[in-house]
Amino acid sequence: MNPGLKASRRALNIEGESSFIVLGNAKMLETQGKRIIHLEIGEPDFITPANIREAAIRALKDGETHYTPTPGMLELRKAIAEKTAQDFGIDVSFENVSVTLGSKEAIFAALASIVEEGDEVLYPNPGYPAYESGVRFFGGKPVPVRLREENEFRMTPEEVNRLVSDKTKAIVINSPENPTGAVLSKDDVKGVVEIARDRGAYVISDEVYRYIIYDGLKHYSPLQFDENLENTIVVDGFSKYYAMTGWRLGYVITPERLTEPLQLVLNLVTACPPSFIQIGGLEALRNGSNAVREMVEQYAIRREIVIEEVSKMRRVHMVRPKGAFYGFINVKEIIDRAKVNSLKLASILLEKYGVAVLHGSAMGSFGEGYIRISYANSVENIRNGLRIMSRAFDEIAGF
């Protein structure tokens, strides 16, 4: 074996998304005949609504199998701009919209377009791991903003202001947030936008859960406080609220100065999203709101079941999620008594008890002491999984 033939440090430094690793381990156990209750993966259990599937099928039958422009079909870009204007009451030009292969590619392209060697990027921790990995991949310095349970895991302007510096290139926000279900208030979002403006930094707003929100709360976007689109980058996608995870369709809205560079990145990586998939996305935007509303109603019911079952557990608690479809459960007393960490606890739950969950440290260093469950699952599986977990915690901690 030639010792000079090595993978790049840049590639080796990427941290894979642990939820997919846990899913793989769970699937392996299932092939061995073990029944697993899946609460680990952040994926709607609903099938993509029929009208969206049928639109893509029609497109295939009509021969929509060719390249599109790199930033996406004009009709889809216009529909995204119109929906954004409708939701937030501001004008967005389709020229600032680029269609991507999921929101992951949108995050990657956004970071590729702005991060230079040594630039600092603030990001929520615990939070979606692609932020930290992406910044590091492009030579930047990821700076974690600790999300605190006493603040309902909101990313507050006070915490951000404490960490910004002359090297800050961008601040990443995610609301509703994965993994905590936190929703930023109007003052939170406005405050972060003002800090970024004062520092000459960008705000990258990941809004992929923005329609999955409860308790009459409202989603606020940095776009509402940056109407000229000077320093806001919005990342969004169709995966979560339209139940289109396997379609891999997302988009990014950028200031004019970033549009061409970002599209050059997209052209290098994927050339363009599949045409028939884009047509499915167009149908989702035009005629998908009722399906979204129905799915969110089901998530709200399931959330109440999670809250009810977790409240019955001993020495365990959880902040009430305000959005998305995750419960971020504080298991610090369990792991302290059992002398394990959250990764080991999750492994025990999977291998011994048949419940797949995600360890909190998978979502960043400040996630240690927690586990994340997804309630994008059936009521039966949620109840059974949480009741098994309750019994498991008692046994593991020796209560």
Image (cartoon, helix red, strand yellow):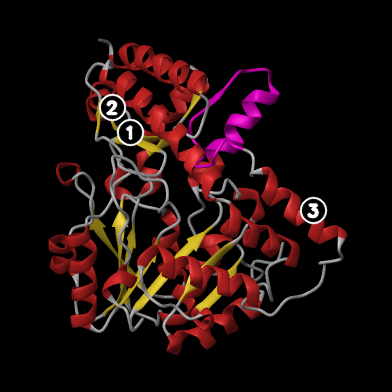
Q: Who comes first in sequence, dot 1 or dot 3?
A: 3
Helix, strand or loop at mark 1: loop
Say whether marks 1 and 2 touch (CB < 8 Å).
Answer: yes
The percent coordinates of residue 91 (x first, y second) are: 41, 77
Taking the magenta stretch, the answer to whether it contains residue 281 is no
Q: Residue at x 46, y 23 (%)?
A: 382
Three-letter amino acid code at the position of disc 1: Asn
Instruction: Kindly tell me whether residue 321 is visible in this rendering.
Output: yes
Badge 2 element: helix
Q: In the structure shown, which secondary structural element does the residue marked by tag 3 occupy?
A: helix
Name the residue that disc number 3 marks.
57
In the visual, does 181 lie left or right of 314? right
C-alpha gap between disc 3 and disc 2: 49 Å
Q: Which residue is mark 2?
A: 335
User: What amino acid is labelled 2 in the image?
Assistant: Ile
Where is residue 37 drawn, in percent x and y? Answer: 54, 23
The region drawn magenta spans 22-46
Residue at figure coordinates x 57%, y 81% from the top left: 263
Badge 3 crowding class, 10 Å Cα cut-off, few under 14, some 14 to 19, many 20 or more, is some
The quarter of the rendered structure image containing the N terminus is bottom right
